[in-house]
Image: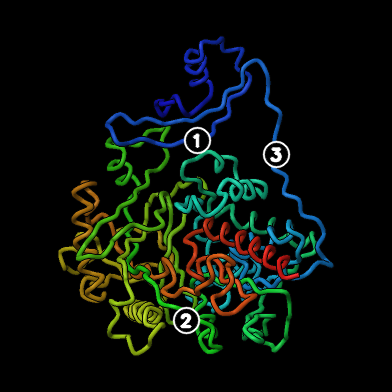
């Protein structure tokens, strides 16, 4: 059903339209469930596409998905390293399957994380174990909560959304084409998930860094923590996220295979939200019935992809470094998406063969490239969490920005000629991509916008290979590489689905070996 924004805003407007289409009296329509909602802004007249379920003369039998979490205190245990979406959803699924999850998270619980994140903003102090990347809920907890994924063949997306809804997310995530929870709501949802795990007899240990893996005869049977505590279990699900660089180094030292993969590095681009609205909706003002506009751009420049990443309408930019001496920028939006700014990563594809200057480092070439550019951007801003930035049109023209526009980035921006400082393979492709984007979205390339360095954690430059049929590591049985850190996911939902798949694969493998 295609409607105007106003018609789609309230049932009182579209119920008469439905009644006419169905040739029934309005009073016979007992319930309308919106199953899908999307915006079509391709034409000058904007339309809202609604997919609805209509009940005539009777109400439906309420079908609620029952997520059953029986006690698992005495059941076989599985270690999970990392309490991000992959680890938490693996834990919930293990409980459903009759196994006890024991989660070890290097960072703090979600409440204590808030205090450490505040220190980054106020005092520019980065705790390497508790920051925007590490801690309960992983990077997603304080980074927006977008639930859109293209991984539609990799698992049950609806099931993941239902679990979020059951733990406190708004019902809109079940119908929106691009569902979004919001930074302000995610901490409470993560706490609810943790409580369910603990109430069922699972365990979650914070401030617990893994220092080694127990491997005997090519079978992983447990872990050693940094305080030398040994913990054994039936298997280990490794769900550490893409910023846990020490894990890759530890695996390599233990002779556990890892491999280089493609990743992306670039900048955060921030515009006034009103400008993005006018570009995307083709009208001077958004109007009262439309949400803040989003965008998604993909270009090919010099045989490499340049694309937008993690677009945050009505959002803010945040300092996402995971260690002192780094500058990393990320973006997020609150539930209402009601700030004056729109930001997005604009990143350039980096392939392993592009990094010849680091080839002596082998599989760690991409990791070192990330580190080098993060340290460079940290040094450009006075060795603080002030972020190096440049007006977008100045960046493309190769001109220093004498001043900078207002920004959502709370620690503050410093004017730096990024066009001269960023690696050539990144800056020249970004410059050309911004020109190409402006031809499609006229007004995008403007000095009202600012580019901020550096957006470097789109994904990991390393993959931990696993067997397709069993999900176990290619050489080490009982070790299940999982989620973004293993190279098999790219966001909250895909990570959650991968966590569930690893839990299911373990359960099947365990029973087959009994």
Q: Which secondary structure lies at badge 1?
A: strand
In which quadrant is the N terminus drawn? Answer: top left
**Residue 435, x across and y down, in percent:** 18, 56
Q: Secondary structure at mark 3?
A: loop
- Indicate the quadrant where residue 274 lies: top left
Label whose residue precedes the other's in the sequence (2 or 1): 1
Indicate which disc residue 64 carries: 3
Spatial CA span between label 2 and label 3: 47 Å
Disc 2 and disc 1 in contact, CB within 8 angstroms: no
Asked whether residue 383 appears in the rendered view, the answer is no
Seen from the viewer's position, the closer of residues 441 and 118 is 441
Does residue 433 lie above or below 60 as drawn?
below
Looking at the rendered image, the disc whose residue lies closer to the viewer, 2 or 3, is: 3
Picture disc at residue 36: 1
Q: Quadrant of the C terminus?
A: bottom right
The span from disc 1 to disc 3 (Cα, nearest Å) is 18 Å
Residue 461: quarter of image: bottom left
Task: Give the residue drawn at x 62%, y 86%.
Answer: 212
Instruction: Give the x, y percent position of residue 5.
Output: 41, 29
**What residue is at 28 percent from the left and 32 percent from the top?**
43
Question: Which of disc 3 and disc 2 is earlier in sequence?
Answer: 3
Residue at numbered disc 2:
324
- Dot 2 falls on a residue whose secondary structure is loop
- Whether label 2 touches label 3, CB < 8 Å: no
* Total numbered labels placed on residues in the image: 3
Asked whether 414 or 84 is in front, the reply is 84
**Residue 380: which quarter of the image?**
bottom left
Q: Give neighbour class at mark 3: few <14, some 14-19, many 20+ (Cα, 10 Å).
A: few
Residue 119 in the figure: left or right of residue 410: right
Which residue is nearer to you in this view: 236 or 10? 236
Q: Please give left or right for residue 229 compared with residue 29 in the image.
A: right
């Amino acid at each position: 059903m295609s409607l105007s924004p106003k018609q789609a805003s309230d049932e009182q407007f579209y119920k008469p339209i439905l009644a006419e289409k169905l040739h029934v009296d309005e009073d016979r329509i007992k319930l309308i469930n919106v199953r899908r909602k999307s915006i079509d802004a391709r034409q000058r007249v904007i339309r809202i596409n609604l997919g609805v379920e209509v009940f005539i003369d009777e109400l439906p039998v309420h079908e609620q998905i029952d997520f059953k979490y029986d006690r698992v205190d005495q059941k076989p245990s599985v270690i999970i390293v990392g309490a991000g979406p992959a680890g938490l959803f693996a834990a919930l699924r293990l409980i459903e399957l009759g196994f006890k999850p024991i989660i070890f998270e290097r960072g703090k619980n979600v409440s204590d994380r808030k205090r450490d994140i505040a220190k980054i903003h106020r005092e520019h102090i980065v705790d390497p174990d508790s920051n925007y990347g590490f801690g309960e809920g992983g990077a997603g907890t304080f980074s927006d909560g977008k639930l859109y994924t293209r991984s539609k063949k990799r698992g049950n997306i609806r099931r993941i959304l239902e679990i979020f809804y059951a733990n406190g997310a708004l019902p809109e995530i079940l119908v929106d084409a691009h569902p979004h929870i919001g930074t302000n709501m995610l901490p409470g949802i993560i706490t609810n998930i943790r409580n369910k795990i603990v109430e069922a007899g699972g365990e979650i240990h914070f401030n617990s860094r893994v220092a080694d893996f127990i491997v005997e005869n090519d079978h992983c049977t447990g872990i050693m923590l940094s305080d030398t505590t040994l913990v054994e279990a039936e298997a280990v699900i490794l769900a550490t996220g893409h910023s846990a660089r020490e894990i890759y180094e530890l695996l390599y030292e233990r002779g556990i295979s890892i491999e280089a993969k493609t990743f992306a590095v670039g900048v955060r681009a921030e515009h006034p939200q009103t400008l993005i609205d006018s570009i995307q909706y083709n009208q001077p003002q958004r109007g009262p019935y439309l949400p803040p506009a989003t965008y998604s751009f993909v270009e090919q420049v010099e045989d490499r992809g340049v694309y937008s990443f993690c677009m945050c309408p009505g959002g803010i930019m945040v300092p996402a470094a995971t260690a002192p001496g780094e500058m990393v920028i990320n973006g997020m939006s609150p539930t209402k998406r009601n700030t004056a700014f729109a930001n997005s990563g604009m990143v350039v594809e980096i392939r392993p063969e592009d990094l010849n200057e680091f080839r002596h480092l082998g599989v760690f070439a991409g990791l070192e490239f990330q580190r080098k550019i993060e340290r460079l951007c940290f040094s450009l801003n006075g060795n603080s969490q002030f972020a190096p930035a440049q007006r977008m049109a100045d960046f493309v023209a190769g001109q220093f920005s004498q001043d900078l526009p207002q920004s959502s980035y709370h620690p503050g921006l410093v004017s730096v000629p990024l066009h001269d400082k960023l690696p050539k393979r990144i800056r020249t492709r970004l410059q050309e991509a911004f020109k190409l984007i402006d031809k499609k979205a006229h007004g995008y390339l403007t000095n009202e916008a600012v580019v901020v360095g550096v957006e470097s954690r789109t994904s990991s430059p390393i993959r931990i290979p696993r067997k397709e049929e069993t999900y176990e590591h290619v050489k080490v049985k009982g070790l299940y590489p999982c989620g973004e850190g293993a190279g098999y996911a790219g966001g909250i939902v895909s990570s959650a689905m991968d966590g569930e798949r690893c839990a299911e694969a373990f359960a099947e493998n365990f029973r087959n070996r009994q």
